[in-house]
Image (cartoon, rainbow, N blue to C red):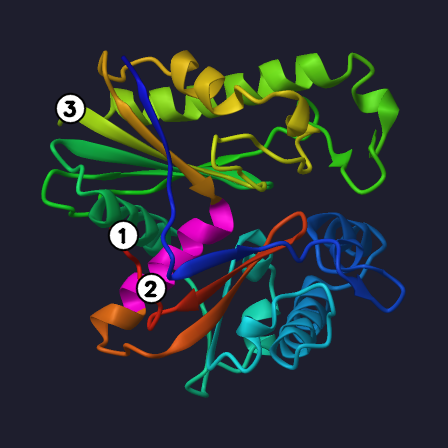
Amino acid sequence: MMELVRGGCAQVQPLEVWNLDVGGKPIWRSLGAGAVESRLDSGELPSDVGRSIADLALRFAEKLRRGEFESMDDTIEGYSKLYFCGGLTRVAGFRSGVDESTDRCWIMDAARDVLAGGRQVIREYSVLSGAAMVVDVGQTAIKTGVLDRGGTAKRVRRFERPWSRLPVWLASENRWRDSRQHPSGQSVQVERLVEFVSRAVTEGLAKTVEPISTLVLALPCELGEKLEPGACSYGDWTRVPDLVTRIAEAIEGLPSTPQVIALNDAELAGLAVLELLEGEGLQGEDALVLSLGFGPGAAYVDTGASNGDG
């Protein structure tokens, strides 16, 4: 029988930031893949767009550090380190727009950090009886990778989101961005999403020699303690409480009794930062992780927090 677990730890706190108001509009309208796409389509140079996005991301992070949003928990105020990850960090000009010469701001490496986050999940739950597949379902692409029995990382593969089949849902407005793209509604969108994820994972499993015992599944939405998903750009998943189960059951190549550990994608990035900080002996440090894809996601990492029993 499949075992479903809500992953996470007390040292990594997911934050809902995508809809915070900046300049009179939600931040995702400016700091998101849709905004970048529109600017590039209008003829702006990619390097100019990338530097502009980097500047906006830094200013947004500083507002969070200063506690300028009343709806945010004040525990994140004054964080000491800042990490960026996600598809927008790959836009030309973004890296040059972020000053990594200081000791408080870095751009994460997707291939390395997806697996680092998955490795930290495995450590939290002490379940590495076999190899593990780590799946990061981002809002612009899926990344998959394998951790062998000893926790050694294997090659990460990337699967771009098929935008024509999986168009954009505007969660804050409860509608599709372009209804002509997807007249069939939410049910078809869910079926296509399950197919997209399961095919990516199945393809990865087919190339894995060592048997997989654990699947770490990171989703780009809020996730309740009973794995109830929130809405995101793929659709209103609040209407699909069994989404995690449906994805796992659609994957071919898993053992008959796999363990599936699900969490938020920003939490996965936060766990990668936790491993990094602890590995460098920086206990007591805290950090903000900003995931920049269709809209910003975030996690707060506090190495000094008690993690209880895991």
Mark 1 crowdedness (10 Å alpha carbons): few <14, some 14-19, many ≥20? many
Magenta range is 265-276
Q: Residue at x 35, y 58 (%)?
A: 272
Q: Residue at x 50, y 79 (%)?
A: 79
Q: Main secondary structure of the magenta part?
A: helix
Q: Which sits earlier in the primary sequence, circle 3 or circle 2?
A: 3
Callout 1–callout 2 Cβ contact below 8 Å: yes
View extreme (bottom): residue: 102
Instruction: State whether residue 108 is above or below residue 310.
Output: below
- Does dot 3 land on a helix, a strand or a loop? loop
Q: Residue at x 42, y 66 (%)?
A: 301
Q: Which mark is residue 120?
A: 1
Please name which of the two marks, 3 or 2, marks the residue nearer to the observer.
2
Q: Which sits earlier in the primary sequence, circle 1 or circle 3?
A: 1
Q: Is residue 257 visible?
A: yes
Q: Amino acid at mark 2?
A: Leu
